[in-house]
Image (cartoon, rainbow, N blue to C red):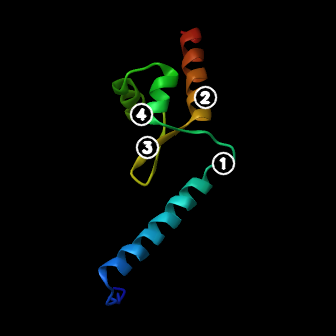
Amino acid sequence: MENKRIIDLQLDEFENRLEQILDSRIIKAISDFREGEELLSRIQVIKRLGIAPSTLNDYTHKGILTSYRIGNRVYYKWSEILEAAIKVERSIRNS
């Protein structure tokens, strides 16, 4: 087991360090997405597609759409939404 060191910090100093760590992780997560990739919030996806929130939940749980968490927010890649729409349309045509 790895030894952990506990540092004596004031609460505000601890909060500042924690905020710096979280900010750097969020920035890294955002930069990991392809350049120019359009990320949409749940509300933006619902409005663009004209669907109910429950429908978006269903699509996500069924694996039709992939959601990405950045911090405590959920985003969708527009390019993946378009790809999913094409796959659904093709499967409808082939059946």
Which of pointers 1 and 3 lies earlier in the amino acid sequence? 1
Residue 5: give x, y in percent of width and height.
Answer: 35, 90
Q: Which label sits in the foreground, 1 or 2?
A: 1
Q: Image quarter for residue 28?
A: bottom right
Is residue 64 at all visible to an observer of this figure? Answer: no
Front in this rendered view, residue 24 or 93? 24
Residue type at mark 1 is Arg
Which of pointers 1 and 4 lies earlier in the amino acid sequence? 1
Which residue, given by chain and number where applicable, does mark 1 sit on? Answer: 34
Which residue, given by chain and number where applicable, does mark 2 sit on? Answer: 83
Q: Disc 1 versus disc 4: distance between alpha carbons?
A: 21 Å
Please, what secondary structure does the residue beneath circle 1 have?
loop
Residue 9: give x, y in percent of width and height.
Answer: 33, 86
The label shown at residue 74 is: 3
Which of pointers 4 and 2 lies earlier in the amino acid sequence? 4
- Residue at 43 percent of width and 69 percent of height: 19
Which residue, given by chain and number where applicable, does mark 4 sit on? Answer: 60
Q: Disc 4 versus disc 3: distance between alpha carbons?
A: 11 Å
The label shown at residue 93 is: none
Q: Residues within 10 Å of mark 4 (few under 14, many from 20)?
A: some
Is residue 34 at all visible to an observer of this figure? Answer: yes
Residue type at mark 4 is Thr
